[in-house]
Amino acid sequence: MAASDGATSLGIVASSVPEVSTSGMSRSEHKSNTTRVILAGLIGNFMEWYDFAVYGYLATVIGKQFFPSENPTVSLIAAFGAFAAGFLVRPLGGLVLVALVMCWGASMQ
């Protein structure tokens, strides 16, 4: 693959992403906006990992209540299996949503 092929494909991807103009923002507004974005990302990340921690901590109770079995190990494995399924499917949902947004964005132009 030649170097120009890579540059061309990057140009196509870069041209399909809308540019965000910050020229109308003052320096303090830009800093405030950046701080808000970082804070929102931190809060979302904290909430997601808190959810995982609580689910992991309560896995034995969830296993007994939602996956009743004679063997408590089977219930626990079923509870962790449901947790793993949700954990593994989230990135796939992200990929699907990105594809839908890209199609929707392309049709808007």
Image (cartoon, helix red, strand yellow):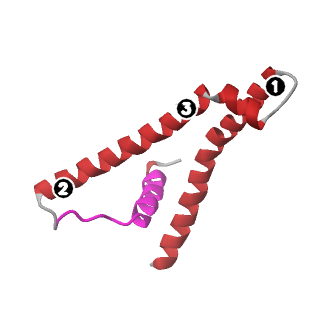
Answer with mark 1 or mark 2, whichever residue precedes in sequence.
2
**Of helix, strand and loop, which mostly describes the magenta segment?**
helix
Disc 3 residue crowd, few under 14, some 14–19, many 20+, Cα 10 Å: few
Answer with mark 2 or mark 3, whichever residue precedes in sequence.
2
The residue to which callout 3 is attached is 54
In the image, residue 108 lies in the stretch drawn in magenta: no
Q: Which mark is residue 74?
A: 1
In the rendering, at what x and y percent does residue 80 appear? Answer: 70, 30
Q: Regarding mark 2 in the picture, which secondary structure is present there?
A: helix
- The quadrant in which the C terminus is found is bottom left
In the rendering, at what x and y percent does residue 44 appear? Answer: 42, 45
The residue to which callout 2 is attached is 30
Write the residue at 88% across / 24% down.
Answer: 70
- In the image, taking residue 26 as reference, residue 47 lies left or right, namely right
Disc 2 residue crowd, few under 14, some 14–19, many 20+, Cα 10 Å: some
- In the image, taking residue 90 as reference, residue 15 lies left or right, namely left
Q: Amino acid at mark 2?
A: His
